[in-house]
Amino acid sequence: MENERTITGGRERLGWVDLLRVAACMAVVFSHSCDAFTGQFDMDKDAFLTGVWSGSLVRPSVPLFVMMTAVLLLPLKPGTTVNTFYKRRIGRILPPLIFWSLALPILMHLYFVYVSPGSGNPLLDTSAYTSGGLVQKLSTFVFNFNFDTVPLWYLYMLVGIYLVMPIIGAWLERASRKEIRTVLKVWVVTLFLPYVQLLAPYAGYAGNYGNMGILGVCDWNPFGTFYYMSGFTGYVLLAYYLVKYPLTWSSGKMAAIFIPMFAAGYLITAGGYIWLNNYYPGNYAYLEIIWYFCSINVLMMTLPVFAACSRLKLGSGGWLGRLAGLTFGIYLCHYIFVFVAYDLLDATGWPIIARLVSAFAVAFAGGAVLTRLFKLTRLTSRLVD
């Protein structure tokens, strides 16, 4: 969601990054459009399966956003201090985070109380939209996002990425190719850990005093063995590595390796979600494990997309550049449009996939129009830029 890069010390627009920004943003909106269908589970098995197979296809969305941030910001511009980096990057994130943490709950409250109090969306209980609930959401957003602001979890995480990026950047400036690869290999190991923890009880593991964490995690310590080597920072390192040391494979070799890799990752993601639902029906705490962005199956889908797009020779600017410039704003505001679109299309009687795709189109277009309106003035543009 950034607008510039410093790989060579100068600033340049990258057409293929603009393409990835648009594709990743569309994938996020599409994913959220799938949620209402996935959330129907056994109430409507066809809707559930359509949502799972469709939503699983776009899991690389957030990892791609993180990787684009790395491409555009690493290595840090010569002379950049930690203080100036924090002031510029985190200072840019805070106004949109604060504004949309307040605006989205208000918009959702107005919509579900006055416009669509009988919404059939299975993800929510419209009776929970009370004045007291709204006040609580507005007063506690400093601690975390809430249901009305689900997409904003990314901003909290992105601030964390920004906090460590100067440290990572300083190491990358002197790290050899082999050293970066070693760290990436350790990170790949961590992508299997959610499944190790999921399967550990079947091997007889009973946890520690009821805490089912592994490798040192317990009630008094949430920081396990691989805590400091895991998470989205791995995607930052991977993006930097792939740009600095681009793959020299032929197109045929790329296709022979990456198409099966993506297909296998997709089948694991969708099939695993359906399989887990058979054992833990409707239990998101377990179901989300297979959809973790930091999982081996999602990496298997993300890597081919990033590698393929990075080889494209695209000019910057034009309609693609203009649309890419709207993606951050679309990401911030689209969630309200997802619910509006679902309600508008719920009673149409259209096939499930047609309703899903149409809901995505309405939500994406609504977010784009609102973002464009915000960009009309300097004051409001800071809230979507």
Image: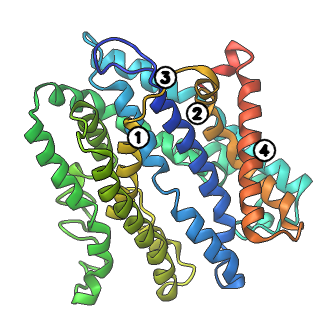
For the residues labelled 3 and 2, the Cα–Cα distance comes to: 10 Å
Quickly name the residue at label 2. 328
Type of residue at label 1?
Val
For the residues labelled 1 and 4, the Cα–Cα distance comes to: 28 Å
Type of residue at label 3?
Asn
Q: Residue at x 83, y 56 (%)?
A: 112
Question: Which secondary structure, mark 3?
Answer: loop
Looking at the image, is 296 positioned above or below residue 238? below
Quickly name the residue at label 4. 107
Q: Earlier in the sequence, mark 3 or mark 1?
A: 3
Q: Earlier in the sequence, mark 1 or mark 4?
A: 1
Compare residues 338 and 19 and report the one nearer the observer.
Answer: 19
Quickly name the residue at label 1. 66
| Callout in the foreground (1, 4) | 1
| Callout in the foreground (4, 2) | 2
Q: Earlier in the sequence, mark 3 or mark 2?
A: 3
Left or right, 273 with reference to 130: left
Q: Is residue 364 visible?
A: yes
Give how far across and how far down residue 225 sits, in percent: 17, 59
Type of residue at label 2?
Phe
| Contact (Cβ within 8 Å) of mark 1 with mark 4 | no
Q: Residue at x 37, y 51 (%)?
A: 304
Q: Earlier in the sequence, mark 2 or mark 1?
A: 1
Q: Quadrant of residue 222?
A: bottom left
For the residues labelled 2 and 1, the Cα–Cα distance comes to: 13 Å
Quickly name the residue at label 3. 3
Q: Circle 3: is it few (<14), some (14-19), or many (20+) Cα within 10 Å?
A: some
